[in-house]
Amino acid sequence: MRGMARRPDATSPPKPLIRHRDAAPGAGTVYAVHPGALPVGVWSGLAGALPEETGFAVLDLGAVPEYGEAALAPAVSRLTIDHLVGLLTAAYRADRDRTGAAGTDSVLVGWSFGGVLAHGMTERLAPEERPRGVVLLDSIAPVDAYQHTEGDEVEPALVLRWFAMFLGARRGAEVRPRPVPEGADADTALARLLEDAIAAGALPQGTPMAGIRKLFEAYTAGLLRNNRLTATYRPEPATVPLVQIKAGDSLVPSDPTLGWSELAGHGITAHSAPGDHYTMLIRPDASQAIAGLVPPLRPAHLVTTRRPSP
């Protein structure tokens, strides 16, 4: 993956699949669905923690121009989850054909909004094409309990907490925002967060209010885009087992499955991994924990495992 995200080309068909490594003969492949926010290279940690015989590929929404445009120009976007699921499913099938993977297992892993698409892909596939399971990484289910009505005020403290996690993950820092005073407006809350982020090393000294405001507007535009996409989406119950792995510091700490129990037609198990919503993709201990919860995909005679670095 080279640690780099590709710039999408709006003039050619999207090519969202990035192959990290092919599977050993007879072994299966993990496909991770990446919804952006962090560089696609963060998945190298999980790839390295999985058994070396297991193939690994990323389906990167950053390679789909319409996805970015839907956040920047929501009034003219006609993007739907069904369209995204179709693009990712086509890329998945093409990769399976290329590698001659018919008859071997796969697992889909979806982080954040990627979990919604991983589930949608599974239900789009024919029964014989479906993965052994879907692993959800701190992913909120597309159910009514988590749907935000367009135009309603978003709880500032909640979104600022998420944004603080995001700022910290970008710089390898931990930002703990101070409580927002009751009745404070958005600028006051952002000004306090700016001080906290600079103190934690997540933003450089001298970052102006305009700088953090621009970052916050882009961040919330992405949240609202995903909310709009799920507003009209009616997912089918899962036909494969679900595994929810929440971050220790999750988006929503109180719900062990983040709503996915409503869609778990074939059962769901709930687990936790170190880190917050973003750093769970970056921390080596989180990668090891997640890898240990991915359903095994290698034949019995392949027993090589990755060990944590000392």
Image (spheres, helix red, strand yellow):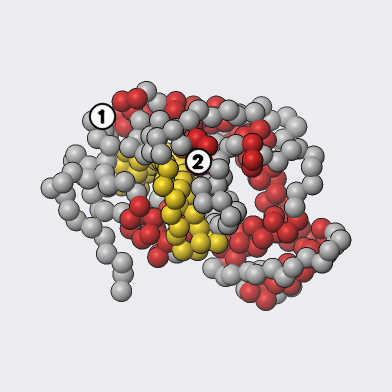
Name the residue beneath numbered marker 1. Answer: 102
Say which residue appears at 37% left-offset and 23% top-offset. Answer: 126
- Comes first in the chain, label 2 or label 1: 1
Q: Amino acid at mark 2?
A: Ser
State the CA–CA distance, disc 2 to disc 1: 30 Å
Residue 94 visible? The answer is no
Q: Residue furthest top?
A: 126
Q: Which mark is residue 58?
A: none
Using a 10 Å C-alpha cutoff, classify the residue at mark 2 as few (fewer than 14 neighbours), some (14 to 19) or many (20 or more).
some
Report whether 77 appears left or right of 168: right
Picture residue at 63% right of the left edge, 69% below the top: 175
Q: Is residue 262 left or right of residue 108?
A: right
- Measured from the top left, where is residue 123 in percent x and y? 44, 28
Q: Position of residue 101 (x, y in %)?
A: 26, 33
Q: Secondary structure at mark 2?
A: helix
Quarter of the image that includes the C terminus: bottom left
Residue 187: x percent and y percent? Answer: 83, 61
Q: In this view of the protein, which residue sits in the foreground, 2 or 56?
A: 56
Q: Residues within 10 Å of mark 1 (few under 14, many from 20)?
A: some
> Label 2, on which residue?
261
How many callouts does the rendering have?
2
| Relative height, residue 83 to residue 200 (above, below) | above
Q: Give the image quarter of residue 22.
A: top left
Q: Is residue 180 left or right of residue 26?
A: right
| Mark 1: amino acid | Ala
Residue at the left extreme of this rendering: 301
For this rendering, which residue is in front, 268 or 180? 268
Q: Answer with left or right where residue 177 lies relative to residue 191.
A: left
209 is higher (above) or lower (below) than 33: below
Task: Kindly identify the residue that appears in the image at 40 percent across and 50 percent down.
Answer: 1
